[in-house]
Amino acid sequence: MLDQSLKDQLVSIFANLKSQYTLEVGLSVSDGASAEMLALLEDVATTSDKISVIKKQEHVLSFRILKDGNPASFIFRAIPNGHEFSTLLLAILNLDGLGKNLPDESVAKRIQALQGDIEITSYISLTCTNCPDVVQALNVISILNPAVKHTIIDGGINQKEVDVLNIQAVPSVYMNGELLHVGRSGLGELLSKIEEKSGTQPVATERIFKKYDAVIAGGGPAGVSAAIYLVRKGLSVAIVADQIGGQVTETVGIENMISISYITGAGLSANLKEHLRTYPVDILENRKIVAASVKDGIKTIETSLGEVIQSPALVIATGASWRRLGVPGENEYIGSGVAFCAHCDGPFYKNKKVVVVGGGNSGLEAAIDLSATSSEVVVLEFLPELKGDQVLQDKISKTKNISVITNAQTLSVEGDGSKVNALKYKDRATDEVHEIVTDGIFVQIGLKPNSQLFSELVELTKYGEIIIDAYGRTSVPGIYAAGDVTIVPFKQIVIAMGEGAKAGLSAFEDKMKDKWM
């Protein structure tokens, strides 16, 4: 199954393994899926003398990893190819104490402090680009705390279970039989949700104080760029983020990064982190900033891990997040008909009718993507005309199973208690209320700046964007902002990177002129 070039890469990846690993394959029946699973794992095993495969008969297709004969606390009921192939590789590396996705000591202590026996089940699709991050994070949690058991289930192979649970979005994560999370996430958010349900032992009561020349809030393209420019000037720098890559991790494909014809969001995020690691930047990942203040020119931020981080310079690069409709029924049906990722959840709506709310680029791209498998796609746009690029509008007009309704104000999401069955909207020109019978609703209505924590510190627009000058300076000396959280038009990755560099250079220039305080 694996070509020789990939096998050669795996030889290098597994070269430093210390323990012996056995891939124990549970074959349910002699079918194509069993043969595919076995062939894949046997190919992987040929790349290291530390890895072997054994077969056993099971009721369901599965495999687990044994480290020196001891079974890991996670099990795959999925064939780890496609987007999940990296999950298989990281599972082995993480068990060996290797892998750049392993958290720092502070986060590891939180994981080890989880209380009770915890059963986690994640339902995934091999076409889902958001699933690997969730699965890999849950595997890490189960490795660091063996009381957490994690089962990874491919909905395509285990369709009956998906139907019983009425799962219509992936990843869907259950904890002890109850729904815990749906959609994209990182280790920090998942850990917080598990803590809320399971409880946690006290880790450490003392607060941790750290000081730097400059702190970057946010790990997207703007934040990473600012950090690199500042550390190259010889300053001590920390970057605080829930996840390096930020919103970029949600992007399936990027085709407008100058000099790179195509790269995935996950690929670019990995590159950003790799570039950061070449410099002495403290990467404080899997945390949320919970408070921010300024006193006597010193900027202080506090994290969800109890850290108090101080510096004379702060760059705010917290980006933006997807807006929600804010209408009745939306929250109730997230994962049961309301979705935000057409690429991830589109396969659940094969031969079904769906509605895309939003006529900008993201909405039109989602509609085009969905039209390949859904029987009918209806695009709703609030304004009198579509906002997306003309090239996308042209493609929409030529796609037979896509229709467009403009001047449409979404009023509510309707359902039968378990799944979506309709959407109500008002015609803004006539005030007439209409109902569209639909199986799914994909929300694509743009972004809102993540500036709430800083609203008392710096000046914002009425839309919540941080006001900056041409140099990235805010209304407060020593505080800078860059990227999608600011007033800068055209929320693009390449622009965010440039703005981050500009903010970093401005901060250094102000330091030279004693303008930080």
Image (cartoon, grey):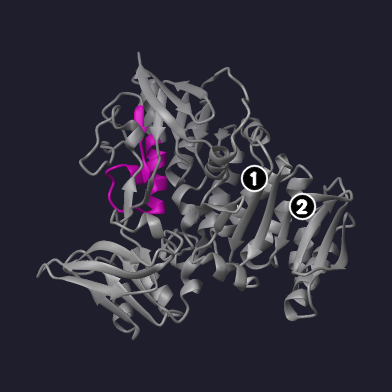
Q: Is residue 68 above or below residue 226?
A: below
Q: Is residue 127 at least partly visible in the picture?
A: no
Q: Is residue 27 above or below residue 226?
A: below
**Which residue does the image show at 46% across and 21% down from the upper left?**
310
Instruction: Indicate the amino acid at tag 2.
Output: Ile
Identify the residue position indicated by label 2 in the image.
92
Identify the residue position indicated by label 1 in the image.
101
189 with respect to 369 (left or right): right
| Quadrant including the N terminus | bottom right
Instruction: Indicate the amino acid at tag 1.
Output: Asn
**Which residue does the image show at 73% across and 57% down from the upper left?**
75
Do labels 1 and 2 touch, CB within 8 Å? no
- Exactly how many numbered labels are in the figure? 2
**Which residue does the image show at 87% across and 47% down from the upper left?**
19
Q: Earlier in the sequence, mark 1 or mark 2?
A: 2
Q: Is residue 515 above or below residue 264?
A: above
Disc 2 secondary structure class: helix
Viewer-side residue, 111 vs 21: 111
User: Residue 252: which disc?
Assistant: none
